[in-house]
Amino acid sequence: MITRTERKTITGTSRRKDTISLVSRLISVAATLGVTVVEGRPLRGRAGHYDDETRTIVLRPGLTRRRKRGVLAHELGHAFYRHIRSCDPYLKARQERQADEYAARLLITADEYARAEQIHGPNVRMLAYELDVTEPIILAWRNMYRAGRYTGRRLISARSTEHLRG
């Protein structure tokens, strides 16, 4: 069961990460996209996968809080772009980049990233810990920002997913 957690950053300031709320918001994004999220056995031992034919995201049971959020946000990227599985390495790499960047936009704002980098510098592992995301999401956010693809706002807010509709 996912529970609320409190933790202290290296600076000593406490903050609350409301994991239930964030996972609920991610599931709301899935519903807005017409996607069902279930726990089960993803393909080839992966942490999760998206099936466009059934519009379903399958998450492996027992993922850590951070990993579950990251995998769910990444798979939502595949759902948003309606990715289908491909054997073409160029297309597959592009799809993975798009899904990682979508996840980064769901989970990180520029202000949050800037604050974390002021505390920890460019260390990817520490930034991921501070922002409570996975390292690939930090790398995707950073690459997206440097390439000028960052839109300047998080895709989901604490209150609404209305802007994702139709």
Image (cartoon, grey):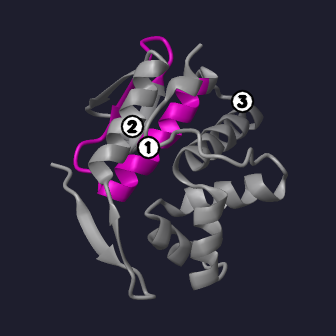
Question: Does residue 125 appear in the picture of this structure?
Answer: yes
Residue 146: x, y in percent?
81, 59
Question: Does residue 43 appear in the picture of this structure?
Answer: no
Q: Secondary structure at mark 1?
A: loop
Label 2: which residue? Answer: 25
Residue 35: x, y in percent?
42, 19
Using the image as rendered, state which of residue 77 and residue 19 is in the foreground.
19
Asked if the residues shown at circle 2 and circle 1 are in contact, with their CB atoms under 8 angstroms apart, the answer is yes
Q: What is the spatial separation of the Cα atoms under label 2 and label 1, in whole angstroms?
A: 8 Å
Query: What amino acid is found at the position of numbered circle 2 in the picture?
Result: Arg
Say which mark, if any, is on residue 88: 3
Using the image as rendered, state which of residue 129 and residue 96 is in the foreground.
129
The first of marks 3 and 2 along the sequence is: 2
The first of marks 2 and 1 along the sequence is: 2
Label 2 crowd bin: few (<14), some (14–19), many (20+), radius 10 Å: some
Query: What amino acid is found at the position of numbered circle 3 in the picture?
Result: Asp
Is residue 47 shown in magenta?
A: no
State the quadrant of the C terminus: top right
Label 1: which residue? Answer: 158
54 w.r.t. 93: above or below: above
Residue at x 48% of width, y 60% of height:
134
> Quadrant location of residue 97?
top right
Magenta stretch: give its range. Answer: 51-80
Residue at x 60% of width, y 45% of height:
154
Q: Secondary structure at mark 3?
A: loop
Using the image as rendered, state which of residue 144 and residue 25 is in the foreground.
25
The first of marks 3 and 1 along the sequence is: 3
**Which numbered mark, 2 or 1, is in the foreground of this view?**
1
